[in-house]
């Protein structure tokens, strides 16, 4: 077997065998297949696709490239959720304590942000002293005692994905449904939870441009997870505007504390949708009892206290959770509406790019994040605005990137004359029983 023949075969749209797929995944991971040949193959896959069987074989090869975490010692239901990424998507930070209050374990391994999308681990590290690198023993001890913990992915969880993703990122081969599917599912299946909810985003701030391509990706991931014996479902959700009105690492924790204090906004609605579906998937709840449990966790204040407990258990300063104003330390400037009308459109990706320009995101892996910067959106799609109104508050550090960020935000928000149709949070739900359109 050799890699040139495999590239040639995919180039003419022929189906690869399981052995060929294992050969190139293992060969690239151990360094025997160089970047330039792997790049050519990834581009051939992006252009010519993969069958479901090929996608499953690629997922399986990547999954077995490293450790598979065994959570059975926890002795309970272990749930996980995965978002395909977006702007102001801080849902994990609220879901972990809420779900723990509902009697299931959340032992989550999350990633860092790159480009215009944020990462859960960076957000958590904006809490002073929070440790996202607990050793395995301490991680399991915190999950068992508190019910939830969130750490960064360990080096040996699907190492094939780490190498392949880094190459895709710089060769224009991220936007391929089979490659995204294998990337996400290899990590999810390796991380050991028994119940998984995927949050597949579409829109300007997401990898999938429209609901139909998001549904296609979701359906493939659910099929693979089901075949692997997991209880798995996927929501297709809107990323045409930032999910939270707070975007930026420390500011997003402020948005999460708002939700845990019961503030009803878009972020709250999405967190509720994900939590309720996930609890139903465990088989311990119906949709109705899941909704009651969710409400009880928020209304009683238990979820907020659980978040603080998790922060303390991971050595962070829990006082910030009860005094979130301590996170707001950047200098404020405003983006102002220059006409009357309705907000008809937003380019979510450009709001993410604006935060990156302020120093709140990375352009390269080596960049150091400024946790204090970010934006607070004062409008959403459908808001009525008058000339002079504040559209967005920008928190910066000594003016770094401020003008560029303000330009990006101003251009990202379209103000028109007619009121747009209401935007739904979720478009569809899919599990082994099929698709439910909202
Ligand atoms: N998230 C991942 O983990 N992998 C992809 O390929 C895309 C989004």
Image (cartoon, rainbow, N blue to C red):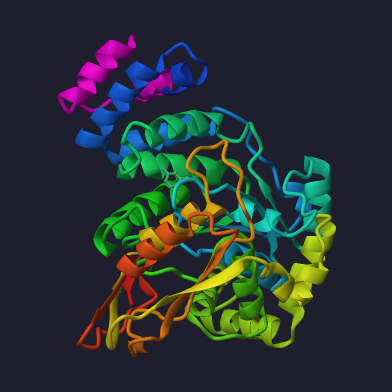
Q: Residue at x 42, y 46 (%)?
A: 224
**Observer-nearest of 395 and 9:** 395
Q: Is residue 430 something one can see in this rendering?
A: no
Q: Which residues are magenta?
A: 1-24
**Observer-nearest of 302 and 256:** 256
Q: Main secondary structure of the magenta part?
A: helix
159 relative position to 220: left or right: right
Residue 8 on the magenta span: yes
225 relative position to 383: left or right: right
Q: Residue at x 15, y 24 (%)?
A: 12
Q: Position of residue 388 (x, y in %)?
A: 38, 86
Quarter location, residue 239: bottom left
Ligand 1 rendered quadrant: top left
352 relative position to 173: left or right: right
Q: Eyeballing the image, is 67 above or below 191? A: above
Q: Position of residue 126 (x, y in %)?
A: 69, 57
């Amino acid at each position: 077997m050799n890699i040139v023949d495999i590239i040639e075969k995919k180039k003419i749209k022929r189906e690869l065998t399981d052995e060929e797929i294992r050969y190139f995944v293992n060969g690239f991971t151990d360094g025997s297949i160089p970047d330039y040949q792997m790049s050519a193959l990834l581009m051939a896959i992006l252009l010519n696709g993969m069958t479901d069987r090929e996608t499953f074989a690629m997922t399986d090869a990547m999954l077995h490239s490293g450790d598979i975490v065994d959570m059975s010692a926890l002795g309970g239901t272990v749930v996980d959720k995965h978002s395909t990424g977006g702007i102001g998507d801080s849902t994990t930070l609220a879901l972990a304590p809420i779900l723990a209050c509902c009697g299931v374990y959340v032992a989550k391994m999350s990633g860092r942000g790159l480009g215009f999308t944020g990462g859960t681990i960076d957000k958590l590290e904006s809490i002073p002293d929070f440790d996202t690198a607990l050793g395995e023993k301490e991680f399991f001890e915190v999950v068992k005692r508190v019910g939830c913990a969130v750490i960064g992915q360990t080096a040996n969880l699907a190492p094939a994905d780490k190498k392949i993703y880094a190459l895709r990122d710089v060769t224009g081969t991220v936007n391929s449904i089979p490659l995204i599917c294998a990337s996400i599912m290899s990590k999810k299946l390796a991380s050991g939870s028994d119940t998984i909810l995927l949050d597949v985003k579409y829109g300007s701030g997401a990898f999938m441009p429209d609901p139909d391509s998001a549904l296609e990706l979701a359906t493939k991931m659910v099929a693979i997870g089901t075949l692997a014996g997991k209880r798995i479902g996927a929501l297709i959700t809107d990323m045409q505007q930032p999910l939270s009105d707070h975007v930026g690492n420390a500011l997003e924790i402020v948005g999460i504390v708002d939700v845990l204090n019961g503030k009803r906004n878009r972020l709250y609605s999405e967190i509720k949708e994900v939590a309720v579906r996930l609890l139903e998937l465990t088989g311990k709840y119906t949709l109705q009892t899941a909704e009651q449990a969710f409400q009880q966790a928020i209304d009683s204040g238990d979820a907020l206290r659980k978040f603080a407990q998790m922060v303390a258990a991971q050595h962070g300063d829990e006082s910030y959770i009860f005094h979130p104003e301590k996170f707001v330390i950047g200098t404020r400037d405003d983006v102002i509406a220059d006409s009357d009308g309705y907000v008809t459109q937003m380019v979510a990706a450009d709001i993410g790019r604006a935060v990156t320009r302020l120093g709140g995101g990375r352009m390269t892996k080596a960049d150091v994040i400024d946790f204090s910067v970010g934006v607070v959106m004062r409008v959403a799609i459908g808001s009525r605005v008058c000339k002079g109104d504040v559209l967005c508050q920008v928190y910066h550090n000594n003016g770094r990137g401020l003008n560029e960020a303000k330009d990006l935000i101003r251009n990202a928000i379209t103000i028109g004359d007619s009121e747009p149709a209401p935007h739904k949070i979720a478009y569809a739900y899919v599990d082994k029983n099929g698709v439910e359109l909202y």
